[in-house]
Amino acid sequence: MRPLFALLCGLVFGIGLIISGMIDPAKVKNFLDLFGTWDPSLAFVMAGAVAAAAPGYWLSGRRIKPFFAEAFQKPANTGVDKRLLSGAAVFGVGWGLGGFCPGPAMTALSLAAPGTIVFFIAMLAGMWMAKRARSADRAATATT
């Protein structure tokens, strides 16, 4: 049952990205261009996403465990550190330059949007490099 609900959630998310225009890099770049051709429509998409997620987030706080897992997965580190800040900066630069973030990039890949393949390969390379850096950091910490 769990894989079926995961597939259903992914399909709903992907369809929502397509309908909202989040897979159009020009629309995203126009949203980020505050002093040029600013397009505020994605702010409404974000507000709608928060409004749709808020009741589920609220209900999850009242449950002992999720429907399809043994326990809720919460981050161990809740502080702001250099890894979080550098990751956010790299994500923001990539989003601003490419007009994509991972979810919309994967959705646009299925539609063969221009430039998506290059962005997707660069995104995978970045994920691989981050994983390698994290492994090297853990190894260095373990030997100290």
Image (cartoon, rainbow, N blue to C red):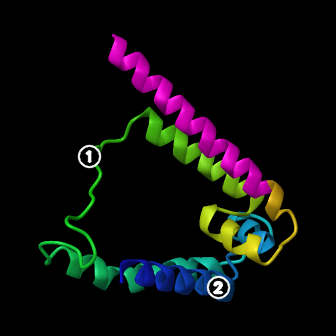
Q: Is residue 80 above or below residue 7?
A: above
Q: Secondary structure at mark 1?
A: loop
In the image, residue 50 lies at what x, y percent?
Answer: 42, 78
Q: Picture quarter containing residue 15?
A: bottom right
Residue 33 seen in this snapshot: yes
Q: Picture quarter containing residue 42?
A: bottom right
Q: Secondary structure at mark 2?
A: helix
Residue at the location (59% across, 86% down)? 16
- Residue nearest the viewer, comparing 46 with 18: 18
Q: Picture quarter containing residue 3?
A: bottom left
Query: What is the distance, in whole Å, between disc 2 and disc 1 at their CAs?
Result: 33 Å
Q: Amino acid at mark 1?
A: Ala
Residue count near mark 2 (Cα–Cα under 10 Å), binned few <14, some 14–19, many ≥20: some
State yes or no: residue 141 in magenta: yes
Image position of 39 (left or right of 52) = right
The residue sitting at the top extreme is 144
Query: Magenta segment range?
Result: 119-144
Residue at the location (60% across, 68% down)? 103
Which residue corresponds to mark 1?
76
Residue 48 seen in this snapshot: no
Image position of 65 (left or right of 50) = left
In the image, residue 70 lies at what x, y percent?
Answer: 20, 66
Q: Which one is in front in this view, the residue at disc 2 or the one at disc 1?
A: 1
Residue at the location (67% across, 68% down)? 106
State yes or no: residue 19 in magenta: no
- Residue nearest the viewer, comparing 35 with 91: 91
Give the numbered dot on residue 20: 2
Q: Is residue 38 above or below residue 53?
A: above
Q: In which quadrant of the rendered image does the N terminus lie? A: bottom left
Give the numbered dot on residue 12: none
